[in-house]
Image (spheres, rainbow, N blue to C red):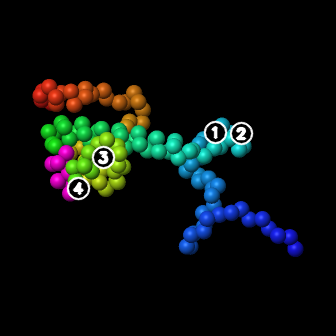
Amino acid sequence: MGVAIVEPCLTFPRRTIAPNRVWKSQLVDSPKGEGDAHRARTSRDMKKTKSEIDEYIGSRIREYRLSLRLTQEQLASALKVSFQQVQNYEKGINGISAVRLFDICKILNVPLASMFPPDDPKEAVVQPPLEDEAKRGTTL
């Protein structure tokens, strides 16, 4: 009887994780016929995409908050979080859960879809930065 060679893996209670496992969500599309040309996205690729979206959503929250002339403290009070948390949302440092984003949209009285980037870049509406207008003291 031969001895089977088993690839090392990490074992946790009721769960085994193979160290070289590639999840379907990590695969990058490649043309057919390339066989093993599928490669896993690196964690850096995935974090970059996630942080870009967090930054975009955060900038939209800031724009809408400023257009209503709300302070970070006022928005934080309505959400029952610290103003630092709102600050981190706006900078894209902390991701926002779906429930929290829904609550923010209700407070700011904007549709949920307005927080996300358009599917087609041509659909993007160019708006003047609200920061500059707020600094000059002009009304929106």
Q: Nearer the viewer, mark 3 or mark 1?
A: 3
Contact (CB < 8 A) between labels 4 and 1? no
Q: Quadrant of residue 134?
A: top left
Residue type highlighted by circle 3: Tyr
Numbered range of the magenta stretch: 72-81
Which element is circle 2 on? Answer: loop
Contact, CB < 8 Å: mark 2 with mark 1? yes
Estimate the spatial distance between the alpha carbons at disc 4 and disc 1, rounded to whole Å. 43 Å
Secondary structure at numbered mark 1: loop
Relative height, residue 29 to residue 133 (above, below): below
Give the residue furthest to the right: 1
Nearer the observer, disc 4 or disc 2? 4
Q: Which residue is mark 3?
A: 89
Mark 2 — residue?
34
Which disc, if any, is residue 30? Answer: 1
Determine crowd level at label 3: few under 14, some 14-19, many 20+ residues with C-alpha closer than 10 A: many
